[in-house]
Amino acid sequence: MLKRRIIPCLDIRDGRTVKGVNFVNLKDAGDPVELAKIYAGHGADELVFLDITATIENRKVLAGLVERIAAEINIPFTVGGGIHGIEDVSLMLQAGADKITINSSAVRRPELISEIAGEFGSQCVVVAIDTKDHENDWIVFIDGGRTPTRHRALDWAKKVASLGAGEILLTSMNNDGTKEGFALDITGDVSRHVNIPVIASGGAGKMEHFRDVFFNTGCSAALAASIFHYGEIDIRELKQYLKKEKIAVRPAPFPLKGV
Amino acid sequence: MIAIIKYNAGNIRSVQNALKRLGCESIITDDKKEIISADKVIFPGVGEAGSAMRYLREKDLDELIISLKQPVLGICLGQQLMCRYSEEGDTKCMGIFDSDVRLFPQVDTVPHMGWNNFFSLKGVLFESISATDDVYYVHSYYPEISSCTTAVCDYILPFSAAMQKENFYATQFHPEKSAATGERILKNFLEL
């Protein structure tokens, strides 16, 4: 049976992780590779690295980081931030990324999706959609959530799927940072109406939230950042909990001790 | 020395990285002499069947692969190209495995992407591997079940998760991205 995936997301600035991390055994909390290895060891199913600075100078730094991650990590990973064209994609894939994610650049130039899919295959194109509920209308935002667009989330999701996206990373801005759970309505809607995998994002605060989003929507994966980084939820524990709740997940590789 | 066949498909370096983590050096090459003299050959790939097959034919690599006598491991697109035919781009493939490659019916999410298990495991590749172990898949086309099938995965319908015929081995999933389970499968291949 195909398993629902748990995906930690790491924000990167100048090749270092941004958010504070409190793992006891971490030698260097700012090193994305160290952190990625811990997550992979805990049973993360994939990883997402988002470069939040994403300037041209930083792209080389990011490519260097991607090479180190690819050398050390034995699960798939996605890289995003500042990807505007085929050359950026090529650079990241050559460095060893399995997938890239695009957001604003896809809204500005939707053909970019089909160009990347045509050149490298749909499987490596994750289109990120940031959306905010405004009077029961889910509007797509770009530029890190600063700029509203004319797109509605569901229509845009269908459009990106038809252009050759391999996966959708759907973030509800209303829920992001609240720790009150994922947006079940829009996640359910998009998952029902597109035929490609949907990753739910924004709002995870408790293990129950993961159960709820998997139980109530057809999403393929759930992504979270701070609750993993701050150690509020241990991925091994989360996997055990979801299994008990009859959600199909890949078990954590090592048995949990003392939990 | 392990040779990883270089052609116009993605994700080739991740195989080299995975071998390196297992302490095994490899070369990525399309040089015929290097491929023929390698102890083992890996034929990986993510991409489109039609253009990949055209590229292999232009370089005569298809004939070379078919003629190899040492253990060969095809991964993902590699496995599909070792079959008879692929619906992707209406492509005649190498015909090592008596199986055709078809597009998943669109009754569930396609691509089949993520961790899934397998069953009816046969052969040395699956030494110490159990049917409850998960491996990472990402594909929209699947190889049909045939007499060469050594592992079955069920997604939308049952398909060949792995195949073997004589010295030719292949997996639809990505052992190089499948954590400890994938490493074990690669190790089993390296120890052949």
Image: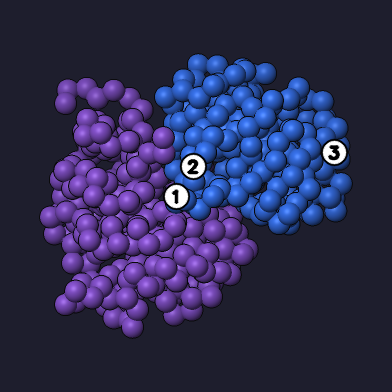
Q: Identify the residue position indicated by label 3 in the image.
A: B64
Q: Is residue B164 left or right of residue B142?
A: right
- Element at label 2: loop
Residue B127 pos. (x, y %): 55, 16
What SS does tag 3 mark? helix
Name the front one of labels 2 and 3: 2
Q: Chain of mark 1?
A: B
The colour with which the image depicts chain A is: purple
Q: Position of residue B49 (x, y in %)?
A: 69, 51
Q: Which mark is residue B156?
A: 2
Q: Residues within 10 Å of mark 2 (few under 14, many from 20)?
A: some
| Residue marked by disc 1 | B108
Contact between marks 2 and 1 (CB within 8 A): the answer is: yes
In the rendered structure, the colour chosen for chain B is blue
**Label 1: element kind:** loop
Give the distance between the C-alpha atoms of the residues marked 2 and 3, in whole angstroms.
35 Å
Identity of the residue drawn at 42% across and 68% down = A158
- What's the CA distance linking mark 1 and mark 3? 38 Å
